[in-house]
Image: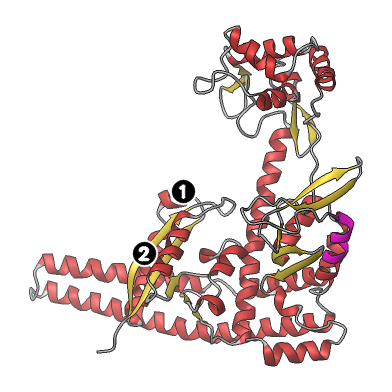
C-alpha cells in the first residue's frame, strides 16, 4: 500500500463574527479533509483562526510555520484558496515554494505549487497574491473612510484621551476623577515656572493619582497630555484638526499659556511630528540594525545606522541625505515599470490561465454533478430498502444523514465553481495597468501613499556604504531581471528563464 503524504491544513476567516456564524472554517476544513482522503494525504495537524486582514501577527499561522520547521517530514500545506493563506507579501515570502520546498495545495483553485511548478503558474500565483493584497488595501481604505466620517461628525474613533470617558459608541463626557487631574496639571504648568518632572511630582504630592497601577505620571506622558488639543474641543486625525462634540476640559486661553510654557521649559512641541518617508523601512546591511532619521540644521533629513546591536558597525557614523536615497529608490522603481508590450504579454498569460481554469472547471463541474447524482441514487435506494423492511429505521436514518452531508458538501463546492473567473482577469488587467504607471503614481503621491507603494514593491531595503540595496517582491522581481529598454530580450527571458 502506498504510503500517505503527511500534510497540515490551514483555514482562516476574516473576522470573529464569521467564525461565530459558522459558515466558513467548518466548510474549509470539510473541503480539505475530502481532498486529503481522495489524494492519499494524511492531515497530521489542522490549524484554523479568525482574524482580520489588517491585524498583525496571526498566531495559528505562525504556529503552523513553527510546526513545519520542527517536523521536517511534513512539507505539504492544504488550504482552500490563495486569499485564505496569504494576507500580505510577508506571508508569501515565508511560504515561497522555491526557498522552502513546501508543496502548497490550493484546493478550491485546483492548483498545486512546488519548486518544480512552471514559471507561468508561479507568475499567475504571484498575481493572485497581489490581488489579495489589493483587496486588503481596498478594505483598509473603506475602514479609513468610515473613521474619517466619524471624526468629521465630531466623535472620537477609539478611546478618548485621559480625562474623558465614553457613555456609548459616540458620546463622551468628563471623567469625574481624571478630569480634575488634567485641569490641575494645566493650571500649574501654565504658570511657566515648573518643569514637567517637577510638575509630575507636585501633582503626586497634592494627592492627584494618575492611575492605580502608576500613581505618579511620567514626564513624557505629562508633556503629551499638555499638548493635546482634545482638551479644548478638537480632534486630531491624520494631522488635521476637526471640531469635536465632547466638552472642553480647559479654556483655550489656559491651553495657550501651557504651550508657551513649553518653550520656557525647553520642551519640543509634540504636536508637529515629522513623517519621515523611509522610517522603519531600511536596515543596515552590516549589523542588521534599523536605519534611523533625523533633521539637521532645521531642514536637511539625514539617515544613519542606529548601531544598537552588540557587534560594532562601521556604518553607524555614515550619514546620508534623504535626497541621495530618493534618487536610488526612484531608479529601483523605474526598473519594474512595465512596458506596453510586456503588459500585453502578461495579459496574454492571464488569458491562457483563464482558459485553463475554464477547462479545469468544466471537468470538476461534471465530476461533482455525477457524484451528487450518485449520492441521491444511493439515498433513493436506502429509502426503498427501508420501505420494504430490509433495513431498520435507525440504520436508514444514520446512512441518510451521512449522504445528506456529502451532498451538501458537493453542492457547496459546485456553487463556488459557478463564480466567474472573469473578475480575476479584469483585476489582473488593472494591476498590470497600475504597474505601467507605478513610477508616475509614486512621484505624485504624499509620504504615506509612497510608503504603501514601497511596501508592495520591495521585500527588503538596506544601506551599504551609502548605497541602497534591495530585493523586489513577487511578481515584480520578474520584471526587473533585464533592461526594460530592450523588451524583446525581456520577453524571451520571461519565457525561458524564470524558474
Front-most of residues 231 and 199: 199
Indicate the quadrant where residue 378 lies: bottom left
Residue at x 67%, y 23% (from the top left corner): 219
Front-most of residues 440 and 334: 334
Q: Secondary structure at mark 1?
A: helix
Indicate the quadrant where residue 89 lies: bottom right
x, y percent for residue 11: 44, 63
Number of disc labels:
2
Q: Residues within 10 Å of mark 1 (few under 14, many from 20)?
A: few
What mark, if any, has residue 16 been given in the picture? 1
Q: Main secondary structure of the magenta part?
A: helix
What mark, if any, has residue 61 been given in the picture? none
Q: Residues within 10 Å of mark 2 (few under 14, many from 20)?
A: some
Give the side of residue 289 with respect to residue 34, left or right: right
Give the side of residue 459 with respect to residue 114, left or right: right
- Report the mark closest to the observer, 1 or 2: 2
Q: Are marks 1 and 2 in contact (CB under 8 Å)?
A: no
Residue at x 65%, y 10% (from the top left corner): 202
Front-most of residues 402 and 52: 52
Give the side of residue 263 with respect to residue 370, left or right: right
Indicate the quadrant where residue 231 lies: top right
x, y percent for residue 275: 79, 45
| Image: 418 above or below 49 | below
Determine the CA span between mark 1 and mark 2.
18 Å
Q: Earlier in the sequence, mark 1 or mark 2?
A: 1
Q: Is residue 327 magenta?
A: yes
| Image: 48 above or below 130 | above
For the C terminus, the quadrant is bottom right
The residue at which mark 2 appears reads as 46
Amino acid at each position: 500500500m502506498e504510503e500517505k503524504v503527511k500534510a497540515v491544513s490551514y483555514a482562516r476567516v476574516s473576522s470573529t463574527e464569521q467564525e461565530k456564524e459558522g459558515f466558513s472554517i467548518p466548510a474549509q476544513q470539510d473541503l480539505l479533509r475530502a481532498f486529503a482522503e481522495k489524494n492519499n494525504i494524511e492531515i497530521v495537524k489542522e490549524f484554523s483562526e479568525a482574524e482580520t486582514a489588517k491585524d498583525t501577527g496571526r498566531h495559528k499561522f505562525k504556529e503552523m510555520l513553527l510546526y513545519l520547521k520542527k517536523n521536517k517530514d511534513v512539507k505539504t500545506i492544504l488550504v482552500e484558496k490563495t486569499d485564505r493563506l496569504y494576507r500580505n507579501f510577508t506571508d508569501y515570502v515565508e511560504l515561497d515554494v522555491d526557498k522552502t520546498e513546501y508543496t502548497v495545495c490550493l484546493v478550491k483553485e485546483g492548483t498545486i505549487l512546488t519548486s518544480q511548478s512552471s514559471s507561468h503558474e508561479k507568475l499567475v500565483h504571484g498575481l493572485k497574491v497581489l490581488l489579495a493584497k489589493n483587496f486588503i488595501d481596498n478594505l483598509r481604505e473603506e475602514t479609513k473612510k468610515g473613521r474619517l466620517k466619524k471624526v468629521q461628525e465630531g466623535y472620537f474613533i477609539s478611546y478618548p484621551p485621559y480625562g474623558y470617558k465614553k457613555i456609548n459608541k459616540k458620546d463622551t463626557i468628563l471623567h469625574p476623577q481624571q478630569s480634575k487631574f488634567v485641569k490641575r496639571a494645566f493650571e500649574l504648568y501654565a504658570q511657566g515656572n515648573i518643569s514637567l518632572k517637577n510638575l509630575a511630582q507636585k501633582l503626586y504630592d497634592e494627592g492627584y493619582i494618575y492611575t492605580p497601577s502608576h500613581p505618579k505620571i511620567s514626564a513624557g506622558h505629562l508633556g503629551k497630555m499638555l499638548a493635546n488639543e482634545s482638551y479644548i474641543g478638537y480632534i486630531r486625525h491624520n494631522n488635521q484638526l476637526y471640531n469635536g462634540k465632547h466638552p472642553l476640559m480647559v479654556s483655550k486661553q489656559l491651553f495657550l499659556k501651557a504651550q508657551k510654557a513649553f518653550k520656557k521649559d525647553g520642551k519640543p512641541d509634540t504636536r508637529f511630528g515629522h513623517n519621515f518617508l523611509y522610517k522603519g523601512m531600511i536596515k543596515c546591511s552590516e549589523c542588521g540594525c534599523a536605519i534611523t532619521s533625523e533633521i539637521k540644521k532645521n531642514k536637511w533629513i539625514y539617515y544613519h545606522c542606529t548601531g544598537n546591536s552588540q557587534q560594532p558597525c562601521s556604518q553607524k557614523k555614515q550619514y546620508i541625505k534623504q535626497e541621495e536615497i530618493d534618487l536610488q529608490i526612484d531608479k529601483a522603481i523605474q526598473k519594474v515599470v512595465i512596458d506596453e508590450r510586456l503588459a500585453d504579454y502578461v495579459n496574454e498569460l492571464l488569458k491562457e490561465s483563464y482558459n485553463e481554469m475554464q477547462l479545469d472547471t468544466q471537468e470538476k463541474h461534471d465530476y461533482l454533478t455525477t457524484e451528487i447524482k450518485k449520492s441521491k441514487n444511493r439515498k433513493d435506494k436506502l429509502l426503498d430498502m427501508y420501505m420494504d423492511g430490509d433495513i431498520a429505521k435507525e440504520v436508514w436514518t444514520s446512512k441518510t444523514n451521512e449522504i445528506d452531508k456529502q451532498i451538501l458538501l458537493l453542492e457547496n463546492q459546485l456553487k463556488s465553481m459557478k463564480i466567474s473567473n472573469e473578475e480575476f482577469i479584469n483585476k489582473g488587467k488593472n494591476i498590470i495597468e497600475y504597474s505601467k504607471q507605478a513610477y508616475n503614481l509614486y512621484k505624485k503621491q504624499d509620504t504615506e501613499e509612497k510608503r504603501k507603494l514601497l511596501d508592495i514593491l520591495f521585500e527588503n531595503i538596506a544601506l551599504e556604504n551609502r548605497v541602497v540595496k534591495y530585493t523586489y517582491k513577487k511578481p515584480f522581481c520578474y520584471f526587473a531581471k533585464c533592461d526594460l529598454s530592450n523588451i524583446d530580450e525581456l520577453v524571451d527571458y520571461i519565457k525561458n528563464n524564470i524558474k
